[in-house]
Amino acid sequence: MMHSQKAIVLVSGGLDSCVTAAIAAQHYTMAFLHVNYGQRTEQREMRAFNEIADHYKIDERLTVDLSHLRTIGGSSLTDPKIAVSPANLHSDQIPGSYVPFRNGNILSTAASWAEVIHAQKIFIGAVEEDASGYPDTRKAFFKAFNKVIENGTKPETRIEIITPVIHWNKKQIVEEGFALNAPLQLTWSCYQNEEVACGVCDSCAFRLRGFQQAGLNDPLPYEKIPDYRQ
């Protein structure tokens, strides 16, 4: 179904971005943007992105290399000398997986592309549940970045960042994914493995807890499946 307005959807290949795409698909013609930034699971995430894009029959898709984030380092996702730590879902400390200002880099790229292809919206699957660790997933960050885009683009340009799952927890995201028939089986969330998900990194833990709390089976294979419901 074609819609009159166009939206860029930032699709990492993970759970949150897939469900965000399913939400955007209801009202917008979608263009998909994916970023490679030297992360450990770059090839697996790229595969997930393309398979999700194929599922939604996306003609406009763009993959951008932001490998300077790997050169800068400072994250266990981009620096092989920094180990990926086991999840601590109750910590309020910034985890080692934080990639400094990654969303700022990605949104800048998305805004540039939006101007060129005349997209009115940029959808990103950011979740404030993660904000205790990641400062660039907070609602305040996206509000500020909307002002940056407004002030830094042509006067006639109208581009707005949309964060439809920002206040949801993973249980709600999983449930919405099932309700919208999002292809969750095509997604990949693990921070350190590309064949079988580890089940113990932050991303695996948040994801598994969402499925467990929703009482639904995660379609991905895992090395370990701890009970994260407590």
Image (tube, rainbow, N blue to C red):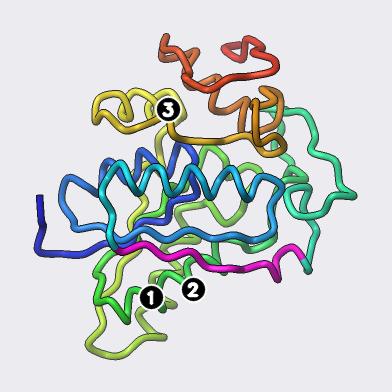
Q: Is residue 178 left or right of residue 217?
A: left
Task: Answer few, some or many: residues within 10 Å of disc 1's Cα (few below 14, many 20 plus, some between 14 and 19).
Answer: some
Amino acid type at circle 2 is: Ser
Q: Position of residue 224 (x, y in %)?
A: 69, 15
Foreground: 161 or 144? 161
**89 with respect to 153 (left or right):** right
Measuring 61% from the left and 15% from the top, which residue is drawn there?
228
The numbered dot on residue 113 is: 1
Q: Which residue is mark 2?
A: 108
Image quarter hosting the C terminus: top right
Identify the element where label 3 is drawn. Answer: helix
Q: Secondary structure at mark 2?
A: helix
Query: Relative to residue 7, is residue 42 depicted above or below?
Result: above
Measured as percent of width and height from the top left, residue 111 is found at 40, 74
> How far apart are the alpha carbons under marks 3 and 1?
29 Å
Height in image: 23 above or below 38? above
Between the C-alphas of marks 2 and 3, the distance is 30 Å
* Three-letter code for the amino acid on which mark 3 is drawn: Gln
Label located before the other in sequence (3 or 1): 1
Residue 160 is drawn in which quadrant?
A: bottom left
Residue under label 3:
185
- Check disc 1 and give the amino acid type: Trp
The magenta segment: 60-70
Disc 2 vs disc 1: which is toward the camera?
1
